[in-house]
């Protein structure tokens, strides 16, 4: 038997053996689903140092003492979707996307402080239109008296260089929308303010399709800096220069 035939024979043997083992192992995995053994759960009591909001079964609760309990009356019953909730830094207000139709701002006692509508229901849908607000991402300022939002001032189509975004805020004191700044391009998705609200950071797509952040001066609209992510995903924006209200998925 030649060396070539011997090698082919061994290769075929190991191939068949590999198929048999793989089939057996996959069968064992399929027939033996993951299980917990000797599971002894203990009750978990959670409490926070600040008031908290709880959403459960279509009802929104507000507990001043920071305890998770649903014994009190809900501050609002919500029919439909409850999306992207954002609590103000002082915990007095909560803003959320209600049923993809409006952004609702509530005080902790359930009194409606304002609505922002109509919304573009998605970022990539065919039903996206010019002049509508975005309900996927909004930011509260550090003083908890403004809710910043983006609008699609001009919307042509996905990735069009003609798309334009505008920054506005809803004043909780005056209960009205205030136009802040028109951007020279589309805010790709997220945006943030500096702690003193003098600068805007927003994501954009450059000519090569890379997603980065621009920093612009709100008073003048002048670009101050551009931040690209490094190989570890860091933008280089110093934490002292940006104020972020975390969303639930962050």
Image: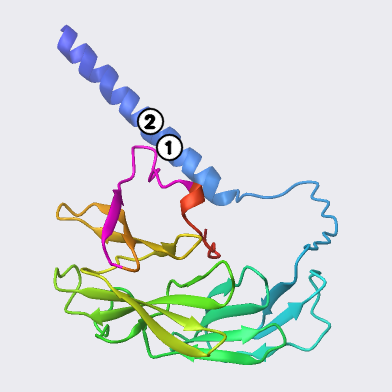
User: Is 107 situated left or right of 96 in this image?
Assistant: right
Looking at the image, which residue is at 42% across and 64% down?
198
Q: Position of residue 82 (x, y in %)?
A: 55, 81
210 or 50: nearer the viewer? 50
Judge whether residue 228 is colored magenta.
yes
Tell me if residue 177 comes above or below residue 189 in the rendering: below
Count of marks placed on residues:
2
Q: Main secondary structure of the magenta part?
A: loop
Tell me if residue 204 comes above or below residue 176 in the rendering: above
- Observer able to see residue 1: no
Res. 207 image quadrant = bottom left
State the quadrant of the N terminus. top left
| Mark seen at residue 22 | 1
Is the residue under label 1 in contact with that under label 2 (CB below 8 Å)?
yes
Residue at the disc numbered 2: 18
Q: Position of residue 17 (x, y in %)?
A: 38, 28
175 or 109: nearer the viewer? 175
Specify start and end residues of the magenta stretch as a single range.
220-238
User: Is 66 situated left or right of 169 in this image?
Assistant: right
Judge whether residue 172 is colored magenta.
no
175 or 69: nearer the viewer? 175
Tell me if residue 120 comes above or below residue 36 in the rendering: below
Residue placed farthest to the top in the image? 2
Task: Give the colour scheme of this rendering.
Answer: rainbow
Q: Position of residue 53 (x, y in %)?
A: 69, 75
Looking at the image, which residue is at 18% across and 7% down?
3
- Observer able to see residue 11: yes
């Amino acid at each position: 038997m030649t060396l070539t035939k011997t090698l082919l024979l061994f290769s075929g043997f190991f191939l068949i053996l590999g198929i048999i083992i793989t089939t057996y192992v996959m069968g064992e995995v399929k027939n033996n689903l993951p299980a917990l053994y000797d599971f002894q759960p203990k009750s978990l009591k959670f409490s926070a140092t600040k008031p908290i909001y709880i959403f459960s079964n279509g009802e929104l609760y507000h507990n001043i003492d920071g305890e998770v309990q649903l014994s009190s009356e809900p501050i609002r019953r919500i029919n439909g979707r409850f999306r992207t909730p954002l609590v103000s830094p002082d915990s007095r207000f909560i803003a959320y996307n209600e049923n993809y139709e409006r952004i609702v701002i509530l005080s902790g006692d359930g009194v409606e402080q304002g609505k922002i509508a109509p919304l573009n229901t998605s970022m990539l849908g065919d039903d996206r239109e010019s002049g509508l607000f975005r309900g996927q991402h909004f930011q509260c300022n550090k003083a908890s008296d403004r809710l910043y939002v983006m609008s699609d001032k001009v919307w042509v189509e996905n990735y069009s260089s003609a798309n334009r975004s505008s920054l506005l805020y809803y004043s909780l004191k005056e209960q009205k929308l205030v136009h802040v700044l028109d951007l020279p391009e589309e805010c790709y998705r997220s945006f943030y303010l500096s702690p003193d609200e003098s600068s805007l950071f927003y994501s954009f797509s450059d000519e090569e399709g890379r997603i980065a952040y621009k920093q612009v001066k709100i008073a003048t609209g002048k670009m101050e800096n551009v931040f690209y992510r490094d190989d570890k995903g860091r933008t280089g924006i110093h934490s002292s220069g940006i104020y972020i209200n975390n969303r639930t998925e962050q």
